Image (tube, helix red, strand yellow):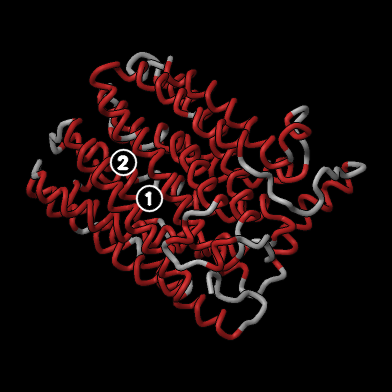
Amino acid sequence: MSGLPDDADQKPIWSSYFTPSLITVLFLGFASGLPLALTAATLGYWLADANIDKTAIGLFGAVATPYALKFLWAPMMDSLPVPMLTRAFGRRRGWILATQLALICAILFLAAARPDINPWMTALAALLVAFTSASQDIVIDAYRVERLTPKTQGQGAAMAQLGYQLGMIAAGFGALHLAGRLGWQGTYVAMAGFMGVGILTTIVCKEPETRGEGQVARNFPEWLRESVIAPFKDFMSHSSWWLVLLFIVVYKLADAFLGRMTSPFFHDMNFSKDDIANIVKFYGTIATLAGVFMGGALTRHYGALRIMFIAGLLHGLTNLLYVEQARLGANTDFLAFSIAVENFSGGVSSAAFVAYLSNLCNVHYTGTQYALLSSLAAFGRTWLATPAGWVAKHLGWEWFFTLSALLALPGLLLLVVLNKRLAMATSLPEAGT
């Protein structure tokens, strides 16, 4: 994969984070993280406040399905222009701006929902937010990969995660505090306003110089061949491509299974909204940010696969801390400790994982290939974790968290096999090295 030269390559690790391209990635990451939280943990707490059943809350996670299916419409966004916007802002920025405007409308629709009265309408609104958010992610991910070099993808992943977590702070820590003052509906209206950060960034940032700018296929068969078939055929030409895809599906499964039910768990433990906002959303986010920056730096030096294994193992083990939390109840000191350890290890593994996905992409098919890879990751996070609510309800919290820790094993075992195969193959080298 090729890329434009970036001044980050010539600077020390930490100072090289502060370049125009990486700062842009930071703010676009904020725009990605904000809507995801509004249909995940924050929505889960709103549903718990509305006395929605645990099993139903777990099933509500299915509204994130668009994140797992975005590869289906990624070829269109990867190759076709947006009327008026593409001419004014370029292919990537035009699509980003279009999805951001649609996101604001979708979040306002969700703000008008009443889960206690009409949960189906709430689910529909959340689904629309997820669809527009997933569409935005297609283009933002492609933009990041195209603006950065292979060597700086780890740092780009760290900056993207930093912005993502800042968006999660706004939609998590900020939303929980605002909910006690403005109510949930007023809070979601405020969250729609925060999308202005992404819009402003899109307007002022630089369009990446990529192949085929402004070129559109002359007919549908040509478009189908060049924009749909070619990206998938290119990826399948790599050695062990099927093993890579399987690994991507299961690597974050333990984290997804746990994350689906943390909000109901904290609610059952009688933690206050302020406790969750201050410890889990704010303090925990700081730990995550420390982890992603460490992960970005370590990935640049040691490679993504090695860092994913070590951090993934530690992160899986941290799920067992929640077993003790279930026994202690609303103990804020232990919660702060467990959140710090879990989020730091998760941040390291996430930075390495994003860098790994980025360097798997061919720059000629960035949007489509990254959408495929991230969709598979979302599939594990969305559908394989859907039974989490049922498991928690029938097994209890302690056995639930024990099971969630064990779910880290398939991804780690696949990573070992993948590392051995890639060591023997030259067509798909270890990403991040």
Residue drawn 43% across the image and 14% down it: 112
Name the spot of residue 288 as percent of width and height, x first.
32, 52
Residue furthest right in the image: 218
Q: Residues within 10 Å of mark 1 (few under 14, many from 20)?
A: many
Q: Residues within 10 Å of mark 2 (few under 14, many from 20)?
A: many
Residue furthest bottom in the image: 424
Name the spot of residue 231 as percent of width and height, x first.
73, 57
Name the spot of residue 248 as percent of width and height, x first.
51, 61
Amino acid under label 2? Gly
Is residue 18 rendered to the left or right of residue 309?
A: right
Find disc 1 in the rendering and name its residue: 256
Name the spot of residue 424 as percent of width and height, x first.
59, 86
Separation of residues labelled 2 and 1 (CA atoms): 12 Å
Examine the rendered structure and indicate whether residue 193 appears above or below residue 27: above
Residue drawn 69% across the image and 62% down it: 362
| Earlier-in-chain disc, 2 versus 1 | 1
Q: In which quarter of the image is residue 135?
A: top right
Residue drawn 65% across the image and 30% down it: 98
Is residue 289 rendered to the left or right of residue 77?
A: left
Examine the rendered structure and indicate whether residue 392 appears above or below residue 6: above
Label drawn at residue 389: 2
- For the residue pair 329 and 368, the one nearer the viewer reads as 368
Residue drawn 41% across the image and 38% down it: 167
- For the residue pair 303 and 381, the one nearer the viewer reads as 303
Q: In which quarter of the image is residue 271?
A: top left
| Secondary structure at numbered mark 2 | helix
**Between marks 2 and 1 in the image, the one whose residue lies nearer the viewer:** 1
Q: Is the residue under label 1 in contact with that under label 2 (CB below 8 Å)?
A: no
Q: Count of labels shown?
A: 2
Amino acid under label 1? Ala
